[in-house]
């Protein structure tokens, strides 16, 4: 299964493209809030975490003169501002995940494509893909790291098929965490994979295998009996949105709408409660890629309008890469959009409250 398009930079929504917001109880409309542009050509936000209505974080990367640097932005209740963060590498620095537990305890990870989830102040999990020593004839493997309050340690995790990796992780307690991604199955097709942590070991869990190929990009859970995983599957013609739900006993596919008959991709999911969740991504149109937001109302997934800024007069290129739930069923989602002139990529942050 191929990705909808390569990741690019994010930036704030230009003035005039805002839409009216709905009440916190319904949260069905999204408005754009400008994030602070770094001043370099490309800026991308990949993930977000919400602590309160007046405190949220977003991470990603900026690219200028061929060198990627880490990017962190903070929402103070009225505006986004850049926060200095270290970039240990000289060229390739990317933050792909963030989780904030308190004003003094937050984690952001990246570099190797990892995503982080914190289950408690002294525990956190990061997942990704281990390509150490990989050659043309060897495969990558799933990678899970565990923070025990003192240090990070790699924890053994299964890699089915001939190789694979993890793209999302979520935890509700020290004995309940989920990690999702994909692996290479028989015949070379990508297939989705779901791993569970029970406090002792990571084990693979049974999951549906729709279409000719499938993969999961993100997961979120509120309890041991309520979790979502999202991504896409190929129906033989195009990529379609994919949502799985965990009810405490098994994972089952739940029907989800597509933005268009052509390629669709879900990159992030956030769950506020059993009856309130959002999934975000993008879908391909003849004019470009548009943002995609799905809302779970407790019974079904429905597509809701979302701004797609930028692009030439005949189309746009914008995509949402991460989403997080806030208080009173509010949500933040982040991503990127392309400027029409010049052809730069800017940060995009949308709020629903």
Image: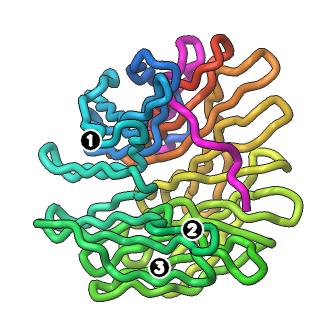
Tell me if residue 309 comes above or below residue 197 in the rendering.
above
Question: What's the distance in space between the residues labelled 2 and 1, CA to CA?
Answer: 45 Å
Say which residue label 1 marks: 52
Q: Mark 2: which secondary structure?
A: loop
Viewer-proximal residue among 100 and 301 = 100
Q: Quadrant of the N terminus?
A: bottom right
**Can you give x and y, in whole percent of width and height, for residue 45 in the image?**
46, 36
Question: Is residue 260 found left or right of 221 in the rendered image?
Answer: right
Residue 227 appearing in the image: no
Examine the rendered structure and indicate whether residue 246 appears above or below residue 7. below
Q: Residue 43, which numbered label?
A: none
Say what secondary structure mark 3 lies in: strand
Mark 2 sits on what residue? 135
Q: Please identify the dominant SS of the magenta region.
A: loop
Q: Position of residue 81 (x, y in %)?
A: 30, 23
Point out residue 314 in the picture as x, y percentages from the top left corner: 82, 20
Q: Is residue 270 magenta?
A: no
Q: Residues within 10 Å of mark 2 (few under 14, many from 20)?
A: few
Compute the Cα span from label 2 to label 3: 26 Å
In-image side of 325 versus 4 (left or right):
left
Labels 2 & 1 near each other (Cβ < 8 A): no
Taking the spot 57% from the left edge, 84% from the top edge, the residue there is 160
Q: Which residues are magenta?
A: 1-26
Position of residue 336 relative to residue 182, above or below, is above
Contact? badges 2 and 3 (CB < 8 Å): no
Please state which of residues 265 and 187 is positioned toward the viewer in this rendering. 187
The quadrant where residue 18 appears: top right
Which is nearer the eye, 216 or 176? 216
Question: Which of marks 1 and 2 precedes in the sequence?
Answer: 1
Q: Counting residues from the N terminus, which is met first, the one under dot 1 or under dot 3? A: 1
Look at mark 3 in the image and give the residue it sits on: 195
């Amino acid at each position: 299964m191929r990705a909808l398009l390569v990741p690019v930079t994010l930036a704030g929504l230009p003035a005039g493209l805002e839409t009216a917001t709905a009440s916190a109880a319904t949260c069905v409309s999204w408005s754009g809030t400008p994030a602070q542009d770094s001043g370099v050509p490309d800026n991308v936000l990949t993930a977000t975490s919400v602590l309160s209505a007046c405190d949220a974080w977003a991470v990603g990367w900026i690219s200028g003169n061929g060198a990627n640097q880490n990017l962190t932005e903070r929402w103070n209740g009225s505006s986004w501002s850049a926060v200095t963060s270290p970039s240990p590498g000289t060229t390739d620095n990317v933050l792909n995940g963030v989780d904030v537990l308190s004003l003094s305890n937050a984690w952001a990870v990246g570099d190797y494509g990892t995503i982080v989830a914190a289950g408690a102040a002294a525990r956190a999990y990061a997942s990704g893909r281990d390509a150490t020593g990989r050659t043309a004839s060897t495969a990558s493997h799933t990678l899970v790291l565990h923070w025990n309050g003192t240090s990070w340690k790699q924890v053994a995790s299964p890699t089915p098929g001939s190789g694979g990796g993890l793209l999302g992780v979520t935890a509700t307690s020290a004995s309940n965490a989920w990690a999702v991604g994909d692996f290479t199955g028989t015949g070379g097709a990508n297939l989705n994979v779901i791993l569970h942590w029970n406090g002792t070991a990571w084990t693979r869990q049974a999951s549906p295998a729709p279409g000719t190929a499938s993969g999961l990009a993100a997961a979120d859970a509120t309890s041991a009996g309520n979790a979502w995983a999202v991504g896409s599957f190929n129906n033989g013609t195009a990529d379609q949105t994919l949502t799985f739900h965990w009810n405490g006993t098994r994972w089952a596919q739940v029907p989800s709408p597509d933005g268009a008959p052509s390629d669709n991709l879900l990159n992030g999911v956030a769950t506020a409660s059993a009856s309130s969740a959002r999934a975000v991504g993008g879908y391909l149109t003849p004019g470009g890629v548009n943002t995609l937001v799905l809302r779970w109302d407790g019974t079904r997934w429905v597509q809701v309008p979302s701004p797609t800024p930028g692009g030439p007069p005949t189309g746009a290129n914008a995509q949402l890469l991460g989403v997080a739930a806030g208080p009173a069923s509010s949500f933040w989602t982040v991503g990127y959009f392309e400027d029409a002139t010049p052809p730069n990529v800017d940060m995009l942050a949308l709020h629903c409250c």
